[in-house]
Amino acid sequence: MGTGRVLSGAGLAAVLAAVTVALLANTSNPPSGQSASPELRIPAALAGTPLISTLRGTEALEAIARLHGRKIDAVDAAVVRYAGGITVWIGASSSPLRAAALLWRMNRSMAGGTQGFSAPRPQQRRGRTVFVTDGLDRRHAYYQSGRFVLWIASAADVGEALEDLLDFYP
């Protein structure tokens, strides 16, 4: 077995270990002691930029399915665009466990990087594991909050917008 294979396996094992920890941590209520809202909510602004457009429900689920090339396991969704090139995708699963499974599948399929995205890098933000990746000329971050999986993308750094999103969906 070549050295490259061993290093790839070690890297994959590290990503899978981080994903496992994230799944266990993020299936509970948010660490702030607040309960995750049972309703899908849309922030009016992120990083000081106003909301431009929103897709909800069936239209949003269909748009997300087109991005993935298949239907995702979600009961509701939103695709939200903000000024400044920020887009947020929110998938609402029927339970936190189903949301964890959705996050797990995304991480497993992206673990070594893909043609369009770099391998996700886990970061701790406000007691949550947030995964950061680059691709399609944008910076991306995604995480789970209760029964929601949230993905944010921006042509610029997602830092401030992600912090606002974490305030809204801790």
Image: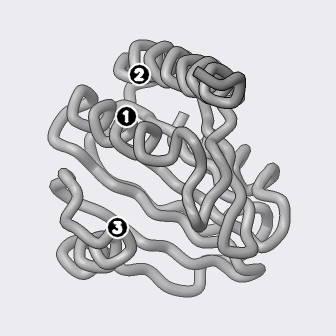
| Residue at figure coordinates x 43%, y 72% from the top left | 79
Nearer-N-terminus badge (1/3): 3
Is disc 3 surrounded by few (<14), some (14 to 19) or many (20+) residues within 10 Å?
few
Nearer-N-terminus badge (2/3): 2
Q: Is residue 69 above or below residue 169?
A: below
| Residue at figure coordinates x 71%, y 58% from the top left | 134
Q: What residue does disc 1 label?
A: 104
Badge 3 element? helix
| Residue at figure coordinates x 18%, y 76% from the top left | 58
Q: What residue does disc 2 label?
A: 23
Residue at the limit of the structure toward the bottom, as seen here: 52
Relative placement, left or right, of 143 versus 164 is left
Quadrant location, the C terminus = top right
Q: What residue does disc 3 label?
A: 68
Nearer-N-terminus badge (1/2): 2
Spot occupied by residue 37 in the image (x, y as percentages of width and height):
35, 39
Between 123 and 10, the one nearer to me in the picture: 10
Q: How far apart are marks 1 and 3 (CA)?
A: 15 Å
Quadrant hosting residue 81: bottom right
Between 143 and 111, the one nearer to me in the picture: 111
Q: Can residue 13 be seen in this view?
A: yes
